[in-house]
Image (tube, rainbow, N blue to C red):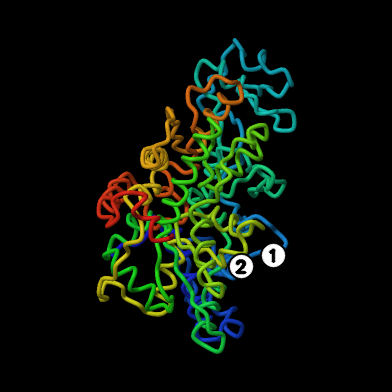
């Protein structure tokens, strides 16, 4: 039974599981220092130079599993001690350098950063190099290469640099908290803060003296996760954990599709507001386009607000694939409605912290939303839902949607709009490749996830958006 794509995810899961297990038993504070030893027992380590360093890194992972650095507003954190295995980033001369006579690399360098040894082999002075890449472009042997760390390659908004200690450093002003670097770091040195303890606390208190209901709001991308079990068993598993009931975030997507299609018809141009990483990117990189961001909340916020409207004492926990949702939940406009956010990775850890084998459970039912609400989980789904919203409300509007699959596609669409050359009137922005099904908090990533989401959508009991939202009136 394989639950994760990588061993890094598995290691992260083990830390989360042990932290949660101790929290359920009210023994976390007394046993917190022992958790690294339970994960890496004995005196050998296959992951680091020695077992002691591995345990030191695990101690940092435990801190992040317990909420991380409270002084750092970013959901994404770097474990400096774990970030020392990657080579120095930047342009380097490889052994393919033939010591040619042309010295084109030297001629093109305006900073005088290229020199040669007695064998005419080129060398780059890092104190002078500005990483322009001109030397690499002119080398006839392609002997100069740009070595970028996986986190820098993954970060398409250029929020990651390398500090003086040779560790990754995140520019919080640029970071959109999408988690791409978290998933791509091969050493797990970059990770997202967890609020799993908050969820354990909410559930425990709901069953104790503080009587309130804890709602689990599940993102539609759940249909592509937990592939070793049936979706209905996941729903039952959530109730076994102590959640009062399980609702579909896709119903919130139906609500947004209705409102967003109406807003689009009124204004003539919009960028979507469902993906918090995309919204953050517009605000940081294209502030001139902020006025075009849809004024509608995300499906998570919209449905959570509705739940608290009918049950003021309710606690709402969103469960999905997105690290940026953790940041969205801290916004002043969202905080009153969403009490905590879990990723699918964290949900798996919660199940196992209570020894819940979901494959042995009966199947529950999840039937709140329409097909169109459910396909929000994949790229293009929001555009399809907006088109359906226009149709069902009889709104005369010639929709020219621009679905953006990943933040690079978002950048191109926004750049064109900023220059008034975009052939479209609705930008659907999804920061992750594939949409939400490619989120950093997924258990699995892959093309097959899109097919699972579409299949899940077709199984919807409510066949139109209007049918789904009619229960809210």
The N terminus lies in quadrant: bottom left
The C terminus lies in quadrant: bottom left
Question: Image quadrant of residue 273?
Answer: top right
* Residue that appears at 60% across and 46% down: 176
Viewer-proximal residue, 316 or 61? 316
State the image coordinates of residue 259 (x, y, percent, origin top left).
Answer: 49, 46
Within 10 Å of the Cα at label 1, are there few (<14), some (14-19), or many (20+) other Cα atoms? few
Compute the Cα span from label 1 to label 2: 7 Å
Viewer-proximal residue, 143 or 367? 367
Question: Image quadrant of residue 340?
Answer: bottom right
State the image coordinates of residue 22 (x, y, percent, origin top left).
Answer: 52, 81
* In contact (CB < 8 Å): disc 1 and disc 2: yes
| Residue 443 in the image: above or below residue 263 | below
| Residue 212 in the image: above or below residue 108 | below
* Residue that appears at 55% across and 24% down: 416
Q: Which residue was labeled with disc 1? A: 70
State the image coordinates of residue 453 (x, y, percent, origin top left).
Answer: 32, 50
Q: Which residue was labeled with disc 2? A: 67
Q: Secondary structure at mark 1?
A: loop
Q: Secondary structure at mark 2?
A: loop
Left or right: 419, with 349 as reference point: right
* Residue that appears at 50% across and 66% down: 307
Farthest-out residue, bottom: 209
| Residue 403 in the image: above or below residue 44 | above
């Amino acid at each position: 039974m394989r639950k994760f794509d990588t061993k890094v995810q598995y290691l992260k899961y083990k830390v989360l599981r042990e932290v949660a297990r101790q929290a359920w038993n009210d023994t976390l504070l007394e046993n917190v220092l022992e958790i690294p030893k339970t994960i890496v027992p004995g005196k050998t380590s296959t992951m680091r130079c020695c077992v002691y360093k591995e345990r030191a890194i695990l101690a940092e992972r435990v801190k992040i599993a317990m909420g991380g650095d409270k002084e750092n507003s970013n959901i994404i954190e770097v474990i400096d001690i774990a970030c020392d295995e990657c080579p120095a980033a930047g342009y380097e001369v490889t052994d393919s350098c033939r010591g040619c006579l042309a010295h084109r690399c030297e001629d093109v360098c305006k900073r005088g950063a290229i020199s040669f040894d007695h064998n005419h082999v080129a060398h780059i002075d890092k104190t002078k190099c500005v990483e322009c890449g001109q030397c690499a472009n002119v080398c006839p042997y392609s002997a100069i290469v740009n070595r970028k760390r996986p986190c820098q390659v993954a970060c398409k908004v250029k929020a990651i640099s390398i500090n003086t200690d040779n560790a990754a450093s995140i520019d919080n002003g640029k970071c959109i908290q999408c988690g791409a670097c978290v998933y791509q770091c091969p050493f797990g040195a970059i990770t997202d803060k967890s609020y799993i303890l908050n969820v354990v606390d909410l559930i425990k208190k709901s069953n104790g003296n503080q009587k309130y209901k804890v709602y689990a709001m599940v993102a539609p991308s759940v249909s592509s996760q937990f592939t070793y079990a049936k979706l209905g068993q996941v729903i039952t598993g959530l109730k076994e954990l102590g959640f009062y009931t399980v609702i579909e975030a896709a119903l919130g997507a139906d609500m947004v599709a209705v409102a967003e299609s109406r807003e689009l018809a009124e204004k003539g141009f919009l960028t979507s507001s469902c993906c918090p990483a995309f919204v953050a990117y517009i605000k940081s990189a294209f502030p001139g386009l902020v006025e075009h961001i849809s004024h509608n909340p995300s499906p998570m916020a919209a449905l959570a607000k509705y739940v608290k409207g009918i049950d003021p004492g309710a606690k709402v926990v969103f469960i999905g694939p997105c690290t940026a949702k953790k940041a969205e939940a801290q916004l002043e406009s969202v905080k009153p409605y969403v009490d905590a956010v879990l990723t699918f990775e964290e949900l798996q850890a919660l199940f196992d912290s209570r020894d819940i084998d979901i494959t042995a459970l009966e199947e529950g039912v999840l039937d709140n939303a329409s097909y169109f609400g459910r396909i929000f989980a994949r790229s293009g789904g929001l555009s399809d839902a907006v088109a359906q919203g226009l149709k069902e409300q009889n709104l005369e509007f010639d929709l020219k949607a621009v679905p953006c699959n990943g933040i690079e596609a978002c950048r191109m669409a926004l750049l064109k709009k900023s220059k008034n050359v975009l052939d479209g009137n609705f930008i659907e922005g999804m920061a992750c490749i594939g949409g939400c099904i490619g989120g950093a908090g997924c258990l699995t990533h892959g093309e097959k996830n899109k097919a699972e989401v579409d299949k899940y959508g077709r199984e919807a009991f409510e066949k139109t958006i209007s049918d789904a939202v009619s229960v809210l009136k």
